[in-house]
Image (cartoon, coloured by chain):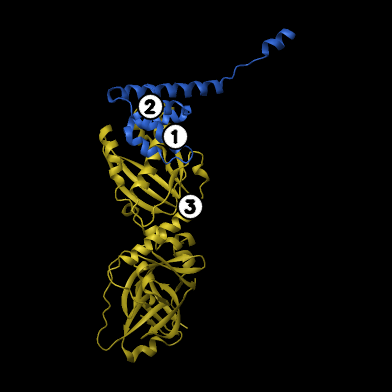
Amino acid sequence: MQGESGQDLALTLWNPDRCLRSVSPEVARYSRGFLRCRPEKWFPGFAMQWLPLAHSLGIEIKLCEAKPVEQAPRRWACAFAGTVDGEPLGLALEEEGAEVLLEAVLPSAAPRSRQIVLEYLARRFLSSMAISWSGPESSLVQFEPDLDANQIREVGAIKVVVSINGAQSTVWILLGRVLVDRLDGLWRRQLQSTSRHNSEDARVQVEFAHLTVPPSLLADYLKPGTTVDLETPVSDTVMVVCEGRPFLPARLCRLGDCFGVETIAAPLPVFQLPAGTTRLSIELGQADWNGVFAREMSQPGAVYDTGIRLGDRVGMVVNGEQVAEALLRTYQGHFVVSVI
Amino acid sequence: MDAKKFRVLPVEQRALVAMAVLLDGREAAVYLKNDAVNGAGLHRAALDLAGQPPDLRMPFVGTMLRMALQEMEQAADSVQDPVMRGRGEVESAG
């Protein structure tokens, strides 16, 4: 659909402030490293540390999940503290999780015994982590009986879900900034070193949509006042494109006053350009990504701060050159652009 | 059964070490060693306790745990119900 400047179409403003999910600067900062890491890879022998205890108690313990998160819930039944090279670390359990553990280890125990068992299991957990750590540098890990875990200024956490005789218990590992930075850097370095091929520097474009237009009609599409239907449903989905080919499926988000781009897990489409047509892309903006950054962004959930202020202006681009500017609007559930 | 290194610990640590040895035996010493305040003491105490003759170890450690827990309960009770001294003197003076 293409509207001439004389027609009055009922277009709706597209307001990114209202349509897009907000992402905090902390989440964006760690989205390519810590929040994408797989902690269980760094502790390969952790489960083995618990086999003898499980065997002697006649229980089955299984690690279900170890996942980094931005924050742990603060409804703990008990919490303990330790340090890694002097940096604080917390171990916390919610009521339900503590009950599952206690029922398996010391059923029907008196309150004081329960507290002692939980403290010992926390010490054991911390020691097991220290023993099974396979990272590049060894660390001094200590249990701190006099440190209050509630005082730890948590910047990230790791959620560890274990199954004990079929019932699940979640242990939250609380981490301060130094430890999160350390794990963030470690994951990103390991990502680079395990990359199958060297990623090259790339110029990428963030596209809302593209159209294939006969060259003879291009001028009509670019005339100021024209409204062009992008034939794309309204959503936060965009495509990161490189050299005219899809590179990463993504969605837009809000990072403060600017657009962010978050990689999503989705199949890459194939751009088909019929013979005799030109690709007219509707772009939010362009960026130069070095190979390292491109590799990090390839992880679903990774966030990139475009630095482009929130708004409805888009570029109309042909062969890498911006040929017009437009305002993004919506019409009957589709994205349209009004050329300015 | 001496367990001297165990007996010198404060009551809370004795309860912890006894519970640890009941659960993990000699391995408990490894898991207690990284205590920032008294790692060496807990480690030695755990080895001390776990080093008891095998046929006597479980009942002995169980007894040590029970005694430590009782001591902790008594200490908690005496904090909650302090003895009111001096009231009789005030009443007799009145």
Neighbor class of circle 3 (other Cα within 10 Å; few <14, some 14-19, many 20+) is: some
In this image, B42 relative to A279: left or right? right
Which residue occupies the foreground of this view, A72 or A121? A121
Q: Select label 2 or label 1 by which is in front.
A: 1
Shade of chain B as shown in the rendered figure: blue
Could you tell me which quadrant the N terminus of chain B lies in?
top left
Mark yes or no: residue A188 visible. Answer: yes
Instruction: Measuring from the top left, give residue A64's x and y in whole percent.
Output: 30, 47
Mark yes or no: residue A333 visible. Answer: no
Secondary structure type for disc 2: loop
Q: Which mark is residue B41?
A: 1
Q: Which residue is mark 2?
A: A109
Q: Which chain is yellow?
A: A
- Residue beneath the point at 67% across and 13% down: B87
Instruction: Measuring from the top left, give residue A187's x and y in whole percent.
Output: 37, 60
Image: B17 above or below A29: above
Which residue occupies the foreground of this view, A314 or A62? A62
Name the subunit of mark 1. Answer: B
Question: Residue most toward the top?
Answer: B92
Q: Which residue is mark 3?
A: A176
Mark 3 or mark 2, earlier in chain:
2
Q: Select label 3 or label 2 by which is in front.
A: 3
Mark 3–mark 1 Cα distance, whole angstroms, equals: 29 Å
Image: A126 above or below A276: above
Instruction: Measuring from the top left, give residue A138's x and y in whole percent.
Output: 39, 53
Secondary structure type for disc 3: loop
The amino acid sitting under disc 2 is Ala
Residue A79 sits in quarter: top left
The amino acid sitting under disc 1 is Gly
Name the subunit of mark 3. Answer: A
Instruction: Measuring from the top left, give residue A241's x and y in whole percent.
Output: 34, 76
